[in-house]
Image: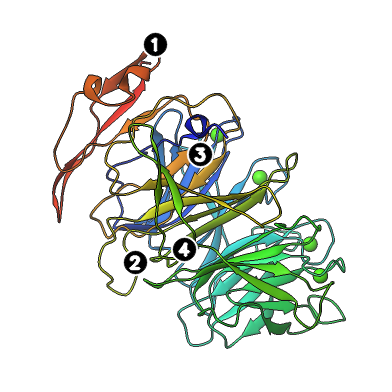
Amino acid sequence: MNTKGRNWERLILDAAPPVKELGSLAVGDLDGDGHVEVVLGGDGGLLWYRPATFEHGLITEGHLNVGLALEDLDGDGVVEVVTARERTILWFKPGADLHQPWAWHTIDSACNGGAHDLLFCDVDGDGARELLANAAYCEVPGVFIYKPGMDLSALWHKHTVSTGIFSEGLGAGDLDGDGRIEIVHGPDWFTPPPAGPFSGLWQRTVVAPSFREMCRTALVDITGNGRYDVVIVESEYPDGRMSWFENRLVEDAENPWVEHEMGGRLESLSHTGRLESLPHTGRWNFAHSLGAWREAGSGQVHVFVAEMAAGGWNQPYNWDARLVEYTTADGGKTWRERLIDRETLSIRARPPPPPGPRQALHGDGHHGGRRGWRWVARRGVRRVVVQEPHLGALRRPGRLPGAQHVRPGWRWTRRVHRHQTVAGRYAGQLVHRVR
Ligand SMILES: [Ca+2]
Ligand SMILES: [Ca+2]
Ligand SMILES: [Ca+2]
Ligand SMILES: [Ca+2]
């Protein structure tokens, strides 16, 4: 594999967003113009950014929860923004353009607790996707399904899947191939009652008995047998574990989940373009982002995991937070583990990658106000190169590795971010196209 052609570049959207911290992130085309926008939420507001132009704006103020999803609710072909603020779940729709005030409506005005995870899935098979939400950090945590009535702007019907068990990490899909949707929540999975998904509480079974309750989960068919396997990472611990659980519900009902731990050595490209191999402890420090997808053509499976730099519970700031991509081409027998980015790698200017699919990935993190940017990496980005000298060592672009690869018509500009951190003065530059 040509590793040099698969570089990732860091794009800093905003070095100092007007919020105290950011905890949620989603990517989608908010205005139907064919270009993705990025939605970010946290303590201070919900923001949108247009990576192509660095335009940005505010969707709403307040302290938003981690739960965030983009879904075309009204069927006009453009996604709306669904998120949670305190104990409410809300949806937002832009006006004529993203800069104008957004309309908003309430889905649930009285959640048990803050929604940490939101996702859409057609739970009842009627062709429309329902909203799944959990309630976390509250007296009666749980998992709920919301189904809208004819009037989207009215409160949605709420069905309880389970209450009384605190977990994080929602996923949903048909795990056993019977045509009905199951729900994964943290280390557990839930099957619907026989009379239908809205006929009662769902039955809980444990997928990952050795995992603690706060997780991220991703459902993806790794083995290629047509059923989802489950990737789980413990997300709120300095020594979190990560495994994928092979789905053998059909083949071996007595032993339906076979654990495969994910560790190994991480491949990393140095800023000089040399491939290095780094040891991996097999433990993850607040790995609060997890995504997985299967390529339709090749069947390759990719798993993306990222640590947040400022973990919860007053943990020390992790200056070494990692962004890693796992890839398998043989059904999970062997994996290629690739370090995409890490906070301490200070210079990210790289030769632009060849044209290819623009796969949007994201890192997630609470930043505690000290470093106000977040990771956004896109495969195939050719428009923006970011370099990021740290601790005040502002360098001239011409002396940076990769700087000579800036395309004609682009120029270096100094923008935005110089601010004080606990480690010293911090500064950076962006390269962007001359308009
Ligand atoms: Ca757009
Ligand atoms: Ca819509
Ligand atoms: Ca449905
Ligand atoms: Ca099923």
Q: Residue 5: x percent and y percent?
A: 51, 29
Q: Are marks 2 and 4 in contact (CB under 8 Å)?
A: no
The dot on residue 314 is none
How far apart, in angstroms, are the residues tagged by discs 1 and 2?
A: 41 Å
Q: Nearer the viewer, mark 4 or mark 1?
A: 1
Task: From the image, tell me which residue sits under label 3.
Answer: 37
Q: Residue 177: x percent and y percent?
A: 85, 66
Q: Nearer the viewer, mark 2 or mark 3?
A: 2
The answer to which of marks 4 and 3 sits earlier in the sequence is 3
Q: Are marks 3 and 1 in contact (CB under 8 Å)?
A: no
How far apart, in angstroms, are the residues tagged by discs 4 and 3?
A: 18 Å
Left or right position of 54 against 256? left
The dot on residue 408 is 1
* Quadrant of the image where one finds ligand 1: top right
How far apart, in angstroms, are the residues tagged by discs 4 and 1?
A: 40 Å
SS under mark 4: strand
Left or right position of 163 against 74? left
The image shows residue 396, relative to residue 339, as above or below, that is above
The answer to which of marks 3 and 1 sits earlier in the sequence is 3
Q: Nearer the viewer, mark 2 or mark 4?
A: 2
The answer to which of marks 1 and 2 sits earlier in the sequence is 2
Task: From the image, tell me which residue sits under label 4.
Answer: 66
Residue at point 48%, 87% (across, down): 139
Task: From the image, tell me which residue sits under label 2.
Answer: 311
Residue at point 87%, 69% (across, down): 178
Q: Are marks 2 and 3 in contact (CB under 8 Å)?
A: no
